[in-house]
Image (cartoon, helix red, strand yellow):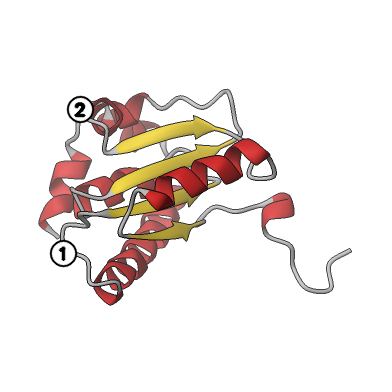
Amino acid sequence: APWLARALLARGGGRLWRTARRRAMLKELSESAAAIGRVAEACAAAGGSPDGEGGVVFDIAAGRGLTSMLLAYALPKLRIVMVDIDDKMDLSHLAEVLEDGRVRYFRLSVFTEAFEQLVANEAAAATWSCTVGTHLCGSLSPRPGAA
């Protein structure tokens, strides 16, 4: 995909690729690629434009924001709301997409009223919306039968 080269060369992005373990990065890239495909399908099903214009995606438990960053390049007019509770995350690899506003980061728990309000406000301003959660863990991804 032509957007992938832009993402790999993004200002600040080099740090992400240098510090990641190869196997973990390949896993995250494949998960993110699957999420991008599903978001593109949701956009098309909602009658959206191929560049994502008018849509908003909520990247829940976003971790380092790889899915958010790649979505920003794959669908450049899409608004991406990245949510994670981790206050120690280094997001310097997202410099370009955070500065130009394609991605906005919120440090929030999804179990709060503030999160509900954020989703309501952002979705109301969009013609279509969807949620991705490629890195859900703990109470966000309960397994049937798990104690």
| Number of numbered discs visible in the structure rendering | 2
Q: Residue at x 22, y 66 (%)?
A: 48
Return the x and y of residue 147 as percentages of the image width and height: 89, 63
Taking 90 as reference, is 102 left or right? left
Q: Is residue 68 above or below residue 105?
A: below
Name the secondary structure under disc 1.
loop
Q: Which residue is mark 2?
A: 11
Disc 1 + disc 2, Cβ < 8 Å = no
Q: Point out which mark residue 50 bears.
A: 1
Residue type at the position of mark 1: Pro
Return the x and y of residue 95 as percentages of the image width and height: 29, 26
* Gap in angstroms between the C-alphas marked 1 and 2: 25 Å
Q: In the image shown, does 106 or 21 lie closer to the viewer?
A: 106
Q: Quadrant of the N terminus?
A: bottom left
Residue 21 makes an appearance in the image: no
Q: Residue at x 29, y 51 (%)?
A: 71
Residue type at the position of mark 2: Arg
Using a 10 Å C-alpha cutoff, classify the residue at mark 2 as few (fewer than 14 neighbours), some (14 to 19) or many (20 or more).
Answer: some
Q: Is residue 69 above or below residue 44?
A: above
Using a 10 Å C-alpha cutoff, classify the residue at mark 1 as few (fewer than 14 neighbours), some (14 to 19) or many (20 or more).
Answer: some
Residue at the right extreme, as displayed? 147
Return the x and y of residue 8 as percentages of the image width and height: 21, 42
Q: In the image shown, does 18 or 84 lie closer to the viewer?
A: 84
- Earlier-in-chain disc, 1 versus 2: 2
